[in-house]
Image (spheres, grey):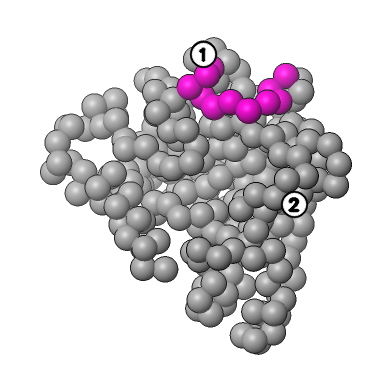
Amino acid sequence: MRASLEVTHMYDVQYGYARLHYESLKANNKFRVRRLSDLDKRGFMKAPVGLEKPEQWQGDRFAGDMTDDEIMTFLEQVVTPEIETTICDHFCAEFMITSLLFLSHGQEEDISFLWHCDTGPGPFLKIIVYLNACGGTSFIDRATTDLFRFGGYLFVEERVADLEGLAIRLGIDYSPVTYFPQANEAIIFQPSRVLHRGRVPNEGTRYVASMTLHPSLSHWRKMPSFDLLRVNPGSGFAQFLWPELGWPDDESAKT
């Protein structure tokens, strides 16, 4: 748990995500009044996206393998007006997309298919876009996740597939929600605030695209380039390119 807090502090302070969130809130007064969605109340929700041909995006790759036009084509079809509004309402700010990764899973086990929360900076979201109807994702709502957090299970080295025994010992009544999305559906969630796990497909291959999002000073389309996506392979969080955001590139600007 302490190691996870130290990592979060590193992202927030040394990498500058805390300042990004602060500056984003200051720059986005129009989002002060917002609507609450299941993303806010439970910590997760499902939503349709508008990919014209989901199958063309199937396969293992990340943004570093793609051209700017390919990245923009994908993002424009995924970030529908409804999804954009939900995310802006959640952050009370505009947002930027900080990672894009395409993944495939068969019947092999993986740590992402065990109960966990993601370690990361401040408030951030993840979108999993299903590119075919195979497999799914399970969630435990925010309030119940907090009970497991207080019981010592959250950012743990030994993840488990079944929380029933721990729930009984801790006296926690929990009811996981499992989505089995169709192609062209997405799950949006707070990965550091809700316990979640992927569901291994019974047969076939599960194709998804995974995106992380953070508050931003300006609309995601106005980012000067997709360099941030290219330097972030999707398994961590890249240090922000402050000159591209119009901030001084010095240590005082990151603390």
Of circles 1 and 2, the one toward us is: 2
Above or below, 170 against 253 in this view is below
Residue 60 is one of the magenta-drawn residues: yes
Q: Quadrant of residue 227?
A: top left
* Residue at 40 percent of width and 28 percent of height: 231
* Residue at 39 percent of width and 32 percent of height: 218
Residue 67, label in figure: 1
Percent coordinates x, y for residue 179 in the rendering = 77, 52
* Residue at 71 percent of width and 69 percent of height: 162
Percent coordinates x, y for residue 116 in the rendering = 58, 60
Secondary structure state at the residue bearing disc 2? strand
Residue 247, label in figure: none
Above or below, 47 against 4 in this view is above
Q: Indicate which disc, 1 or 2, sits on the residue closer to the N terminus.
A: 1
Percent coordinates x, y for residue 61 in the rendering = 58, 26
| Crowding near the residue tagged with mark 2, few <14, some 14–19, many ≥20 C-alpha atoms within 10 Å | many
Q: What stretch is highlighted in magenta?
A: 56-66
Q: What residue type is labelled 2?
A: Arg
Closer-to-camera residue (135/215): 135
Quadrant containing the N terminus is bottom left
Identify the residue position indicated by label 2 in the image: 199
Q: In which quarter of the image is residue 164?
A: bottom right
**Position of 86 compared to 96: left or right?**
right
Residue 38 is one of the magenta-drawn residues: no
Q: Distance between the residues labelled 1 and 2?
A: 31 Å
Q: What residue type is labelled 1?
A: Thr
Closer-to-camera residue (197/176): 197
**Position of 217 compared to 64: left or right?**
left
